[in-house]
Image (cartoon, grey):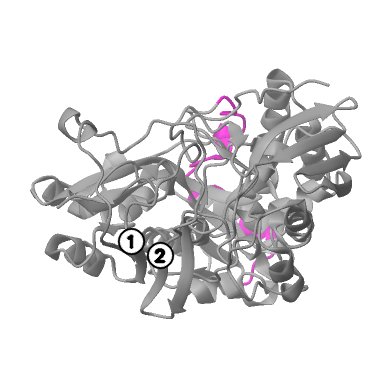
């Protein structure tokens, strides 16, 4: 029996909130109410039932998983104490930390972990993928969980490091049944108190939290709840979020307009935070119903777009976007330029020819977008104009973020929608390559290659698989990548500590200076 070290395959992430020398020596202060302006109401508070990063960034203050990511995006234990891999990679034996309490005062044991992970395998998009390789899971004793696999997995620990694999009390999981959680009781440094729609989501310090002994490391290591409360306040208008930080109504605001960047840099009371890498802007195409089931129409859309003006409209300053064909960032070992000739073609003549070959008769292409993420709306506006110049008819439907997330599960309601695909440490778990959502890209060879990728541990072999996947992505037009994007957050200077590591936000280990 031996302990297997996790091989680094992710991006070396630079913490974007480096503290200067004076602050580094400052003693953190306990107390205060931290107010964070978010982009709007989350579609759900049940992490496993959502792919929205916003849900993760809120709820992982209360919920924790067996593993998490260090600063290099390599899996490290969180609720787990240690693990071993035996039987030719088919058996994972995970030892749990002792004495950890849920927010209801109950001690966490394997009797809670097993049903939580079974539910994760049933309802979470990544869980569903990885659970196909699970033969069984058992609670060997109160502090030991054993997972038996049908085949080796290069992705299991990455999946168990994601927030959607959070652990809850057994009775909470059982009460949820096949539906969403009815209570949000976790083990995190903050406990969930209330959700008042359109007002706030409130967390308070969990006084019985047991932190890990190691120094803070990425999303792991020691977590300290310095502030008494965190209020996540939905503020859909970007200008209102920025104004609120300027006046002191909020301490931090997500997704501020990039066109305010120069002015923000001149303000003494606040500071800009560029989140790089964050994700890539994308037009998701409906492969199950409607106009985009035609490959030639998908190829026509891809050919028509000129990405530079689309990116400029959405992100403004060059500091906030990058034109690159890769499904993975240049900072990652998985970056590929295969298929680059089909990215950013800006060839309207080719698009018109493909429309004619497809027998397109001007039926409206329903493009769904939202102003809550303003870049998505502005990307869509420019793309709509370019598509219409090539001969498409575009019905741009602007909805709130929660409505878009609801509609996207009903393929009869849309043809295209705007979103962003965020960084994925494990390429086999990247949302752009999944076939688990209604209407999203499914392709026989792609699914076979993804199955190979999930069990492959050799980096060179993984890269070869990714090159082939990217070639298929561009030929079949799985989605249309627009550009890499880097977002802008703002914070008041009294908010101290590391509260943003690309690409996810967190507020444990952060405090409010006087």
Q: Identify the residue position indicated by label 1 in the image.
A: 228
Q: Give the image location of residue 433, x and y in percent.
A: 68, 46
The crowd level at tag 2 (other Cα within 10 Å; few <14, some 14-19, many 20+) is many
Q: Give the image location of residue 305, x and y in percent.
A: 47, 51
Q: Residue at x 75, y 32 (%)?
A: 154
Residue 121 can be seen, yes or no: yes
The reply to whether the magenta stretch includes residue 358 is yes
Q: Give the image location of residue 377, x and y in percent.
A: 40, 65
Task: Identify the magenta region.
Answer: 333-361
Q: How many marks?
A: 2
Q: Residue at x 46, y 33 (%)?
A: 217
Q: Is residue 367 left or right of residue 313?
A: right
Q: Residue at x 59, y 56 (%)?
A: 101
| Quarter occupied by residue 503 | top left
Depth check: give the residue in front, 124 or 211.
Answer: 211
Q: Identify the residue position indicated by label 2 in the image.
A: 204
In the picture shown, does residue 70 fall above or below 244?
above
- Quadrant where the image shows the N terminus: top right
Q: Give the image location of residue 443, x and y in percent.
A: 78, 49
The reply to whether the magenta stretch includes residue 501 is no
Callout 1 secondary element = loop
- The mark nearer the N terminus, 1 or 2, is 2
Depth check: give the residue in front, 234 or 231.
Answer: 231
Depth check: give the residue in front, 419 or 238.
Answer: 238
Q: Is residue 201 left or right of residue 82?
A: left
In the picture shown, does residue 405 fall above or below 489?
below
Residue 395 can be seen, yes or no: no
Residues at discs 1 and 2 in contact (Cβ within 8 Å): yes
């Amino acid at each position: 029996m031996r302990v297997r070290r996790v091989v680094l395959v992710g991006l070396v992430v630079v913490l974007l909130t480096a503290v200067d020398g004076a602050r580094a020596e400052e003693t953190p202060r306990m107390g205060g109410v931290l107010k964070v302006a978010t982009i709007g109401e989350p579609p759900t508070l049940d992490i496993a039932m959502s792919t929205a990063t916003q849900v993760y960034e809120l709820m992982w203050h209360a919920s924790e998983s067996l593993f998490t990511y260090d600063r290099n995006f390599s899996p490290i234990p969180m609720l787990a104490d240690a693990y071993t891999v035996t039987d030719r990679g088919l058996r994972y034996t995970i030892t749990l930390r002792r004495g950890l309490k849920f927010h209801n005062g109950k001690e966490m044991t394997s009797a809670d972990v097993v049903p939580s992970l079974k539910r994760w395998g049933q309802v979470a998009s990544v869980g569903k993928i990885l659970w196909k390789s699970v033969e069984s899971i058992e609670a060997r004793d109160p502090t030991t969980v054993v997972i038996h696999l049908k085949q080796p997995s290069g992705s299991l620990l990455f999946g168990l490091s994601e927030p959607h694999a959070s652990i809850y009390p057994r009775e909470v999981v059982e009460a949820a049944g096949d539906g969403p959680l009815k209570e949000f009781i976790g083990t995190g440094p903050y406990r969930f108190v209330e959700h008042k729609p359109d007002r706030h989501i409130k967390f308070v310090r969990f006084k019985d939290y047991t932190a890990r002994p190691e120094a803070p490391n990425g999303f792991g290591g020691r977590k300290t709840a310095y502030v008494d409360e965190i209020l996540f306040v939905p503020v859909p208008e970007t200008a209102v979020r920025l104004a609120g930080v300027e006046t002191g109504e909020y301490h931090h605001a997500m997704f501020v307009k990039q066109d305010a960047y120069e002015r923000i840099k001149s303000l003494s009371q606040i500071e800009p935070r560029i989140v790089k890498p964050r994700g890539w802007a994308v037009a998701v195409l409906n492969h199950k119903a409607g106009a985009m089931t035609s490959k030639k129409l998908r190829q026509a859309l891809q050919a028509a777009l000129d990405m530079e003006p689309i990116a400029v409209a959405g992100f403004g300053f060059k500091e906030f976007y990058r034109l690159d064909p890769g499904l993975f960032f240049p900072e990652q070992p998985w970056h590929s330029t295969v298929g680059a000739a089909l990215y950013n073609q800006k060839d309207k003549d080719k698009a018109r020819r493909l429309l004619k070959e497809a027998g397109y008769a001007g039926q409206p292409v329903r493009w769904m977008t939202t102003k809550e993420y303003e870049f998505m709306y502005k990307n869509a506006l420019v793309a709509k104009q370019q598509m219409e110049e090539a001969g498409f008819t575009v019905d741009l439907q602007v909805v709130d973020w929660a409505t878009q997330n609801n509609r996207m599960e009903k393929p009869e309601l849309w043809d295209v929608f705007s979103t962003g695909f965020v960084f994925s440490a494990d390429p086999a778990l990247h949302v752009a390559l999944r076939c688990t959502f209604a209407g999203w890209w499914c392709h026989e060879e792609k699914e076979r290659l993804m199955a190979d990728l999930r069990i492959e541990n050799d980096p060179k072999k993984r890269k070869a698989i990714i090159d082939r996947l990217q070639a298929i992505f561009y030929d079949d037009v799985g989605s249309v990548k627009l550009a890499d994007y880097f977002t802008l957050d703002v914070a008041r200077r009294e908010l101290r500590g590391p509260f943003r590591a690309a690409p996810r936000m967190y507020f444990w280990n952060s405090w409010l200076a006087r």
